[in-house]
Image (cartoon, rainbow, N blue to C red):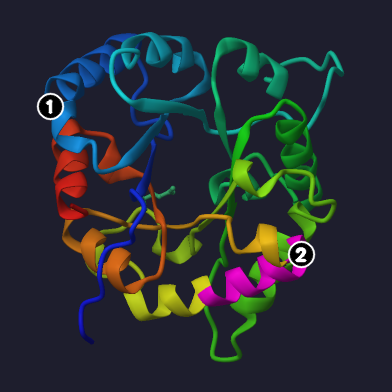
């Protein structure tokens, strides 16, 4: 396939740190070494998503560079005084502008938090109410010859965005096929398959949100994006950027990836 041009807008890169970085000092060290080289990376729109307890440290540590902070999840409740919940308004008042919603590791019924489509819809509504930018994750567990992955993605999108609560400017969709997460570049999805799904997601967004809003929502890909496959996925996958797990958790592998999408 002939190489296409990189997208005209800055690629959106969201570093999903999951629970890789666990201590304040690790966040500070990461931010310090990234800050030293940050001037080289003005061609990307970078966010980092640390665990909840490290959000204040990340907000402080990345203050001097153009890196946005995102939360990895949010409570579906609004002002319900529920034990253990981190509500959208708390994130907003802390100064966190973005939140990842519906990541497959949160949706998983046994090893995750068991977040169903209904919970994800409530999380989207709660985040929208507080004016947070939402990174809505969708993705199939497996693929089969019958192509059921398309209906899985359509129902995840339709359910989460049923009430069209978030303006298109405050919404991104991250397509993350579960089978491609946490592996290596060679096991990631092929750019042509990503492109096919991006077209399907775009069509579904237009159906749900209407044409004007539906065409504006950035669509990201996530699942074993590394420096080795980032450029090809960006050029041929039709995506606006990436949600990156393991490759974003060390400054070296993150900057190698940012170099690759130059
Ligand atoms: P990965 O994770 O890049 O390690 O595959 C992506 C994600 O789960 O968001």
Quarter occupied by residue 202 = bottom right
* Neighbour tally class for label 2: few under 14, some 14-19, many 20 plus, Cα within 10 Å: some
Q: Which residues are magenta?
A: 199-210
On residue 37, which mark appears? Answer: 1
Residue located 57% across and 34% down the image: 99
Q: Is residue 96 visible?
A: yes
Quarter occupied by residue 124 = top right
Q: List x then y, in percent, for residue 37.
A: 12, 27
Q: Is residue 87 visible?
A: no
Q: List x then y, in percent, for residue 139.
A: 56, 62
> 209 or 73, which lies in front?
209
Image-based side of 261 in relation to 215, left or right: left
41 lies above or below 35: below
Residue located 14% across and 47% down the image: 259
The earlier-in-sequence mark between 1 and 2 is 1
Residue 202 in magenta stretch: yes
Q: Work out how far the residue at label 1 is from the one at label 2, CA to CA, in angstroms.
A: 41 Å
59 lies above or below 99: above
Image-based side of 200 in relation to 28, left or right: right
Q: Secondary structure at mark 2?
A: helix
| Residue for badge 2 | 208
Q: Main secondary structure of the magenta part?
A: helix
Residue located 82% across and 17% down the image: 82
Residue located 39% across and 16% down the image: 58
Residue 34 in magenta stretch: no
Count of labels in the image: 2
């Amino acid at each position: 396939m002939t190489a296409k041009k990189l997208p005209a807008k800055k690629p959106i890169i969201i570093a999903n740190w999951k629970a890789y970085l666990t201590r304040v000092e690790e966040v500070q060290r990461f931010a310090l070494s990234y800050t030293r080289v940050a001037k080289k990376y003005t061609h990307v729109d970078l966010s980092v998503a640390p665990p909840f307890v490290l959000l204040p440290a990340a907000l402080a540590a990345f203050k001097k560079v153009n890196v946005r902070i995102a939360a990895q999840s949010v409570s579906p409740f609004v002002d319900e005084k529920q034990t253990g919940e981190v509500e959208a308004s708390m994130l907003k008042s802390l100064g966190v502008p973005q939140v990842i919603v519906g990541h497959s590791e949160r949706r998983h019924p046994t090893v995750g938090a068991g977040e169903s489509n209904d919970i994800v819809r409530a999380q989207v509504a709660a985040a929208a109410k507080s004016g947070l930018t939402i990174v809505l994750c969708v993705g199939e567990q497996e693929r089969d010859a019958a192509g059921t992955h398309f209906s899985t993605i359509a129902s995840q999108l339709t359910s989460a965005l049923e009430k069209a609560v978030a303006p298109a400017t405050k919404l991104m969709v991250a397509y993350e096929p579960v089978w491609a997460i946490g592996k290596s570049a060679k096991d990631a999805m092929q750019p042509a398959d990503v492109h096919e799904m991006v077209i399907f997601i775009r069509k579904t967004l237009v159906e749900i949100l209407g044409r004007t809003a539906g065409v504006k929502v950035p669509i990201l890909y996530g699942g074993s994006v590394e420096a080795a496959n980032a450029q090809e996925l960006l050029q041929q996958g039709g995506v606006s950027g990436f949600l990156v797990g393991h490759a974003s958790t060390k400054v070296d592998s993150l900057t190698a990836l940012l170099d690759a999408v130059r």
